[in-house]
Amino acid sequence: MKKILIIEDEQVLRDEVAVLLNNSGYEAHCITELHNIAEQMKNSDADLILLDINLPEVNGQALLQEFRKVSDTPVIMLTSRTTEIDEVLSMSYGADDYVTKPYNPTILLLRISAVLKRSAKTSSNTQMYHDAEVSSVKGSLTRNGNEQILTKNEMIIFQVMLDRIGEIVTRDELMTALWDNDEFVNDNALSVNISRLRGKLSDLGFTEAIETRKKQGYVLK
C-alpha cells in the first residue's frame, strides 16, 4: 500500500483528501503540526507528498526546493492560485505535478496514480553502490544529496564494474563494452575516462574506489 503524506493547513480539506485516499487504497498520513515541516517531510518515508503552496509560516515552494536537496520522493503541489508563475516555479523547483483547488477528486486520483507510475518506472532503473544511488536514466550517482553526473562513457565503464563489483574487469572487456558507443574510444581515452570516474567517486567520498591491477585490469571496491 502506497503511503501518501498530506501537507495542508485547511483541516476540512485535509480530512476530505485523507478519506478519499484511504478509500482508494492508499495509506494517508497528515501533518497537523505545521512546525518543522521540512524535517517531517524528510522523516515521513512517504511514497508521494501532497504539498500546499500557501502554508501559514512557510512557502510550499521553498519547502519543495529544500526537500529536493535530499530526496526525489514525488511531490504534487496543491494551490488555490491559478497564475502560471506558480506552476512554472513549482515545476522548476522539482514538483512532479501541480493541481489547483477546488479540484475534482477523480482527477486528483488520476494525477496521483500517474505520478506514482512514473516514479516506479524511474526507480526500476536505479541500483545502489554502497549507500549511493546509481541512476542509469540520468547517468548519475547520488550520495547524501550530493549528485555527480557521469558522461555516457563513464556510466558504461562504471556499470560494467558495478555489475562485477569486487572482481577484476580487464581493459579489453571495458573497450568491448564501449565499442558500440558513438564516441571512438582508444586506450588513452579509456585511461582518461577511468581517471575522471575515480575523481567523481572521490568527490562522493569513495576514495580509492577503483583499484588498478597491473597487467590484469580494474576492481571496483
Image: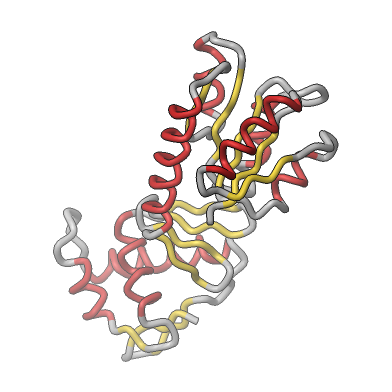
State the residue at coordinates (32%, 90%): 216
State the residue at coordinates (49%, 59%): 141
Residue 145 on image: x %, y %: 62, 52
Q: Which of 88 and 210 lies nearest the eye of the viewer?
A: 88
Residue 46 on image: x %, y %: 62, 51
Viewed as shown, does residue 5 lie left or right of 221? right
Query: Vertical placement of 191 versus 114: above or below?
Result: below
State the residue at coordinates (43%, 56%): 123
- Residue lying furthest top in this view? 83
Q: How is the image coloured?
A: secondary structure
- Residue lying furthest left in this view? 180
Q: How many marks are shown on the rendered structure?
A: 0
Q: Which of 29 and 52 lies nearest the eye of the viewer?
A: 29
User: Which quarter of the figure has residue 107?
Assistant: top left
State the residue at coordinates (60%, 53%): 146
Residue 116 on image: x %, y %: 45, 46
- Residue lying furthest front in this view? 23
Viewed as shown, does residue 166 lie left or right of 174? right
Viewed as shown, does residue 216 lie left or right of 60? left
Query: Vertical placement of 162 versus 201: above or below?
Result: below
Viewed as shown, does residue 55 lie left or right of 2? right
Residue 202 on image: x %, y %: 56, 66
